[in-house]
Protein backbone atom coordinates (compact mmCIF):
# COMPACT_ATOMS: atom_id res chain seq x y z
CA UNK A 1 0.00 0.00 0.00
CA UNK A 2 1.67 3.07 -1.22
CA UNK A 3 -0.70 5.66 0.30
CA UNK A 4 -0.42 4.32 3.87
CA UNK A 5 2.65 6.40 4.70
CA UNK A 6 1.02 9.58 3.45
CA UNK A 7 -2.10 8.84 5.47
CA UNK A 8 -0.09 8.30 8.65
CA UNK A 9 1.82 11.52 8.04
CA UNK A 10 -1.43 13.40 7.48
CA UNK A 11 -2.96 11.94 10.66
CA UNK A 12 0.10 13.02 12.68
CA UNK A 13 -0.17 16.51 11.21
CA UNK A 14 -3.87 16.67 12.11
CA UNK A 15 -3.16 15.52 15.68
CA UNK A 16 -0.46 18.16 16.03
CA UNK A 17 -2.79 20.83 14.66
CA UNK A 18 -5.52 19.74 17.11
CA UNK A 19 -3.06 19.93 20.00
CA UNK A 20 -1.87 23.37 18.86
CA UNK A 21 -5.48 24.57 18.58
CA UNK A 22 -6.28 23.40 22.09
CA UNK A 23 -3.20 25.20 23.44
CA UNK A 24 -4.14 28.38 21.56
CA UNK A 25 -7.69 28.22 22.99
CA UNK A 26 -6.31 27.79 26.51
CA UNK A 27 -3.96 30.73 26.01
CA UNK A 28 -6.82 32.88 24.73
CA UNK A 29 -9.00 32.04 27.71
CA UNK A 30 -6.27 33.21 30.07
CA UNK A 31 -5.86 36.58 28.34
CA UNK A 32 -7.29 39.79 29.69
CA UNK A 33 -8.90 42.49 27.55
CA UNK A 34 -9.79 46.04 28.56
CA UNK A 35 -11.92 48.80 27.05
CA UNK A 36 -13.05 52.14 28.34
CA UNK A 37 -15.59 54.78 27.44
CA UNK A 38 -16.19 58.40 28.35
CA UNK A 39 -12.50 59.25 28.48
CA UNK A 40 -11.81 56.46 30.95
CA UNK A 41 -14.83 57.14 33.14
CA UNK A 42 -16.05 53.57 32.62
CA UNK A 43 -13.66 50.64 32.22
CA UNK A 44 -14.65 47.05 31.48
CA UNK A 45 -12.28 44.08 31.68
CA UNK A 46 -13.06 40.69 30.13
CA UNK A 47 -11.22 37.42 29.86
CA UNK A 48 -10.78 35.32 26.74
CA UNK A 49 -13.91 33.34 27.61
CA UNK A 50 -15.96 36.49 26.93
CA UNK A 51 -16.73 36.83 30.64
CA UNK A 52 -16.80 40.31 32.15
CA UNK A 53 -14.49 40.11 35.16
CA UNK A 54 -14.33 43.76 36.22
CA UNK A 55 -16.23 47.00 35.80
CA UNK A 56 -14.83 50.29 37.08
CA UNK A 57 -16.96 53.42 37.18
CA UNK A 58 -15.44 56.74 38.19
CA UNK A 59 -17.50 58.44 40.87
CA UNK A 60 -17.75 61.71 38.94
CA UNK A 61 -19.66 60.05 36.08
CA UNK A 62 -22.43 58.86 38.42
CA UNK A 63 -25.21 61.41 38.00
CA UNK A 64 -28.65 60.40 39.30
CA UNK A 65 -30.20 62.85 36.85
CA UNK A 66 -28.49 61.24 33.86
CA UNK A 67 -28.52 57.48 34.40
CA UNK A 68 -28.91 56.92 30.65
CA UNK A 69 -25.46 58.39 29.95
CA UNK A 70 -23.86 55.97 32.44
CA UNK A 71 -25.76 53.07 30.91
CA UNK A 72 -24.56 54.08 27.44
CA UNK A 73 -20.94 54.27 28.62
CA UNK A 74 -21.18 50.81 30.18
CA UNK A 75 -22.73 49.36 27.03
CA UNK A 76 -20.08 51.00 24.83
CA UNK A 77 -17.16 49.76 26.92
CA UNK A 78 -18.67 46.27 27.22
CA UNK A 79 -19.29 45.96 23.48
CA UNK A 80 -15.77 47.24 22.75
CA UNK A 81 -14.08 44.74 25.07
CA UNK A 82 -16.15 41.83 23.73
CA UNK A 83 -15.23 42.85 20.17
CA UNK A 84 -11.55 42.78 21.15
CA UNK A 85 -11.95 39.24 22.47
CA UNK A 86 -13.80 38.18 19.32
CA UNK A 87 -11.20 39.74 17.01
CA UNK A 88 -8.29 38.15 18.89
CA UNK A 89 -10.05 34.78 18.87
CA UNK A 90 -10.68 35.00 15.13
CA UNK A 91 -7.09 36.06 14.44
CA UNK A 92 -5.60 33.33 16.61
CA UNK A 93 -7.85 30.46 15.63
CA UNK A 94 -8.05 31.54 11.99
CA UNK A 95 -4.43 30.57 11.49
CA UNK A 96 -5.45 26.93 11.92
CA UNK A 97 -8.26 27.03 9.37
CA UNK A 98 -6.54 28.96 6.54
CA UNK A 99 -6.87 27.06 3.31
CA UNK A 100 -9.16 24.38 4.72
CA UNK A 101 -12.31 25.83 3.13
CA UNK A 102 -14.46 25.09 6.18
CA UNK A 103 -18.11 26.04 5.76
CA UNK A 104 -19.67 28.93 7.65
CA UNK A 105 -16.55 30.53 9.12
CA UNK A 106 -16.18 28.06 11.95
CA UNK A 107 -13.71 30.34 13.80
Image (tube, rainbow, N blue to C red):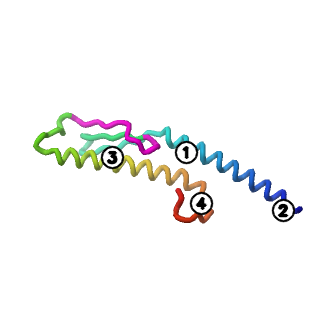
Give residue 64's position: percent from left, percent from top. 12, 40
Q: Quadrant of the N terminus?
A: bottom right
Range of residues picked out in magenta: 47-58
Counting labels gives 4
Between marks 4 and 1, how big is the CA–CA gap? 17 Å
Question: Which-is-in-front pick, marks 2 and 4?
Answer: 2
Task: Write down the residue under mark 3.
Answer: 78
Mark closer to the chain start, 3 or 2: 2
x 28%, y 48%: residue: 75
Assign a secondary structure to mark 1: helix
Q: Nearer the viewer, residue 96 or 104?
A: 104
Mark 2, Cα crowd under 10 Å, few <14 / some 14-19 / many 20+, is few
Q: Closer to us: mark 4 or mark 1?
A: 1
Q: Which residue is mark 2?
A: 3
Q: Which residue is mark 1?
A: 25
Q: Which mark is residue 65?
A: none
Label 3 element class: helix
Question: What's the residue at 60%, 45% (across, down)?
Answer: 22
Q: Is residue 23 left or right of residue 54?
A: right
Report how far apart the C-alphas of labels 1 and 2 lie in the structure: 33 Å
Report how far apart the C-alphas of labels 1 and 3 lie in the structure: 22 Å
Q: Position of residue 79 (x, y in %)?
A: 34, 50
Residue 70, image x and y in percent? Answer: 20, 44
Inspect the magenta stretch and tell me whether residue 55 lies in it. Answer: yes
Q: Does the magenta segment cover residue 31? A: no
Mark 4, residue position:
98
Left or right of 100? Residue 50 is left
Mark 4 and mark 3 lie on one chain; the one further toward the N terminus is 3
Q: Earlier in the sequence, mark 1 or mark 2?
A: 2
Amino acid sequence: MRGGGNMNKMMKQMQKMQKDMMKAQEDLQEMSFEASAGGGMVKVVANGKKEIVEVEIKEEVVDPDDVEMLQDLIITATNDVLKQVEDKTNDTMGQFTKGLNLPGGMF
